[in-house]
Image (cartoon, helix red, strand yellow):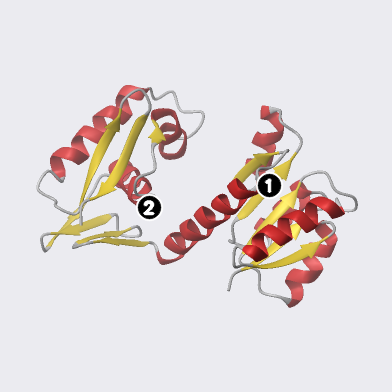
Amino acid sequence: MFNILVVEDDPDMRELFCTMLTDSGYNAIPAVDGINALEIMDRDYIDLVIADLMMPRMDGYNLTRSLREANYELPILIVTAKDQFEDMQRGFRAGSDDYMIKPINVKELVLRVEALLRRAKISAEKKIVIGSTKLDYDALTVTFQGKESILPQKEFYLLYKLLSYPNKTFTRQQLMDEIWGMFSETDERTVNTHINRLRDRFAECGDFEIITVRGLGYKAVKKC
């Protein structure tokens, strides 16, 4: 069972999150602020942190920064009423993995927790296996039909991202921000070019295909 640390100074919100997570099969552990969260993490193993931003003693920004500086690699989901882009940017740059703005849909919260834990597992193993196709993140290699190929870095990261979340649609902007960086001057045509190259490389692969979602972006679909 996964241990989810819920760091929230509002007692009603903290109880709501914990109850929903418990009902969904997680072990929810409450903390009233960042200091309390660090005390708990000193004695308990935690798989994921959900943290409010505005809290007494230690807020979500400083908690996130402290965990990253201490080399904790677990997923961190920020929940907050602060909806300005600058606040979101600050949260991500402190080291958070996802960001939700209050009022929170608790069902969506659970879905995001599931996605973050799945991504953390893939990230820890750094390998994806779909049918006979294998991706090795460290080596930037893809093996299919018994042949191993080393892909150009951007092509590999793009394919790895899509196959990490089968059936999930990513906009071109999302892919550009993650693969090329939020401040890159790369335009959407570069993403299209890399997708076309991947399609050519794996045209004979029967394990997956990359589909264009009209007006949105791309998704990878398992065929096996």
Residue 144 at x, y = what percent?
15, 58
Residue 17 at x, y = what percent?
72, 55
User: Looking at the rendering, in which quadrant would you find the C terminus?
Assistant: bottom left
Give whichever of 211, 71 is nearer the camera. Answer: 211
Residue at 84% across, 52% down: 12
Residue 112 at x, y = what percent?
56, 50
Specify the amino acid type for callout 2.
Ser
Q: Label 2: which residue?
A: 164
Give whichever of 91, 108 is nearer the camera. Answer: 108
Residue at 15% across, 43% down: 201
- Which of marks 1 and 2 precedes in the sequence? 1
Q: Secondary structure at mark 1?
A: strand
Q: Label 1: which residue?
A: 78
Residue 55 at x, y = what percent?
85, 48
Q: Looking at the image, can residue 139 be seen? A: yes
Specify the amino acid type for callout 1.
Ile
Around disc 2, counting alpha carbons within 10 Å, would you say few (fewer than 14), some (14 to 19), or many (20 or more)?
A: some
Residue at 75% across, 34% down: 82
224 to 158, vertically: above or below: below
